[in-house]
C-alpha cells in the first residue's frame, strides 16, 4: 500500500507535481499497489483550486481517497469521508464498528447539513482568506526577525510552513530555549528529519500572537548561534 498526502502535505506544505502523480499512478497500477490518498487540505487552497486528486485518474478503484472536517471545520467532530469501492467501504465500516461501535450519528448529521447548507462555501472562503493572511504575517515576521537564517517554500494552501534553519542547531536545545521564552514549535525531528528543520502552524495562533511568538523564537535561535 502507498500512503500519500499529495496536496499541501503535512509537514512540508508540498504539492506533488502532475508528472509525478502520473508516474506514481502508473507504477502503483502496474504493481497492483493500492494508494491511500489522504487529502485534508485541498479545500484550504489559497488561490484557485488545489490540483485535482489522484483519485480523478482512477478508473479501477485502486485509490482510496479520504478527506476530513478536521482542518476545515472542527477536529472535534471526528468526521471525514472516503471515496472507495463499496466492498472496501463496507469492510472498513465493519472494522470501525468492531473497534468502538461506530461514530455517533449526531455529529454526522451536523456535518452533512453543514456541507449542504448555503453557509459552507462562504465558510471556506473566509477560512482561506484568514489562513492566507496568517501565513503572510508569519512569513513577514520570519523574514524580519531571521532574514537569511531561515528559508522555506511559501505554501499555497494547508496550515503549515516548513522551514530550514541556517545554521542548523540541535532540535532539543532550540525547543528548550523556545519553551523558556514561552513559545513552542514542532521540531523537524518529530517527522524524521535531521536537526535544523522546523514546522510552524499558522492556523491556531491568533494574529496578534504570531509576531511576538516569532520574535521569541528568533531570540531562542540567536541564543544558540550568537
Ligand atoms: C496529513 C493529515 N491527514 C489527516 C489529518 C486529519 O486527521 P483526522 O481526520 O483524524 O482528524 C491530519 C491531521 O492532523 C493530517 O495532518
Image (tube, grey):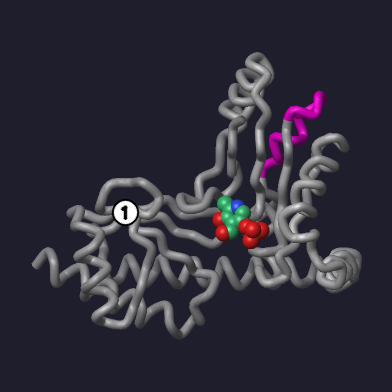
Q: Is residue 162 above or below residue 182?
A: above
How many residues crowd around disc 1 within 10 Å: few (fewer than 14), some, or many (20 or more)?
many
Tell me the quarter of the image containing the N terminus. top right
Instruction: Give the main secondary structure, helix, strand or loop, of the magenta stretch.
Output: loop
- Please identify the quarter of the rendering in which residue 122 is found: bottom right
**Residue in front for this viewpoint, 156 or 196:** 196
- Residue at figure coordinates x 51%, y 81% from the top left: 206
**Residue in front for this viewpoint, 194 or 201:** 194
Give the residue number, with chain letter if any, for mark 1. 197
**Residue in front for this viewpoint, 136 or 108:** 108
On the image, the x and y values in percent for residue 218 come to 25, 72
Q: In the rendered image, is residue 157 in sight?
A: no
- Residue at figure coordinates x 28%, y 58% from the top left: 150
Q: How many numbered markers are drawn?
A: 1
Would residue 212 be found to the left or right of residue 98 on screen?
left
Q: In the rendered image, is residue 33 in sight?
A: yes
Q: Is residue 17 above or below residue 125?
A: above
Would residue 63 be found to the left or right of residue 196 on screen?
right
- Please identify the quarter of the rendering in which residue 4 is found: top right
**Magenta region:** 51-62
On the image, the x and y values in percent for residue 48 come to 69, 53
Indicate whether residue 57 is drawn in magenta. Answer: yes
- Label 1 sits on a secondary structure element that is strand
On the image, the x and y values in percent for residue 147 come to 26, 63
- Residue at figure coordinates x 80%, y 59% from the top left: 102
Would residue 41 be found to the left or right of residue 91 on screen?
left
- Residue at figure coordinates x 76%, y 52% from the top left: 98
Which residue in the rendered view is the most extreme toward the front? 98
Which residue in the rendered view is the most extreme toward the top? 30
Which residue in the rendered view is the most extreme toward the bottom? 208
Q: Where in the image, quadrant-wise, is ligand 1 located?
A: bottom right
Amino acid at each position: 500500500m502507498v500512503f500519500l498526502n499529495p496536496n499541501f502535505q503535512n509537514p512540508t506544505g508540498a504539492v506533488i507535481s502532475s508528472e509525478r502523480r502520473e508516474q506514481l499512478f502508473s507504477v502503483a497500477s502496474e504493481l497492483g499497489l493500492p494508494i491511500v490518498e489522504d487529502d485534508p487540505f485541498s479545500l484550504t487552497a489559497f488561490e484557485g483550486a488545489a490540483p485535482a486528486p489522484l483519485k480523478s485518474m482512477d478508473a479501477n478503484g485502486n485509490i482510496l481517497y479520504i478527506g476530513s472536517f478536521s482542518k476545515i471545520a472542527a477536529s472535534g467532530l471526528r468526521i471525514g469521508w472516503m471515496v472507495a469501492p463499496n466492498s472496501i467501504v463496507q469492510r472498513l465500516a465493519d472494522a470501525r464498528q468492531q473497534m468502538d461501535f461506530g461514530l455517533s450519528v449526531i455529529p454526522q448529521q451536523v456535518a452533512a447539513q453543514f456541507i449542504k447548507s448555503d453557509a459552507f462555501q462562504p465558510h471556506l472562503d473566509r477560512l482561506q482568506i484568514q489562513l492566507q493572511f496568517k501565513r503572510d504575517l508569519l512569513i513577514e515576521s520570519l523574514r524580519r526577525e531571521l532574514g537569511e537564517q531561515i528559508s522555506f517554500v511559501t505554501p499555497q494552501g494547508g496550515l503549515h510552513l516548513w522551514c530550514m534553519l541556517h545554521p542548523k542547531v540541535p532540535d532539543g536545545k532550540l525547543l528548550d530555549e523556545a519553551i523558556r521564552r514561552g513559545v513552542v514549535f514542532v521540531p523537524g525531528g518529530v517527522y524524521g528529519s535531521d536537526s535544523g528543520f522546523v514546522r510552524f502552524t499558522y492556523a491556531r495562533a491568533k494574529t496578534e500572537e504570531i509576531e511576538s511568538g516569532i520574535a521569541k523564537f528568533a531570540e531562542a535561535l540567536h541564543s544558540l548561534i550568537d
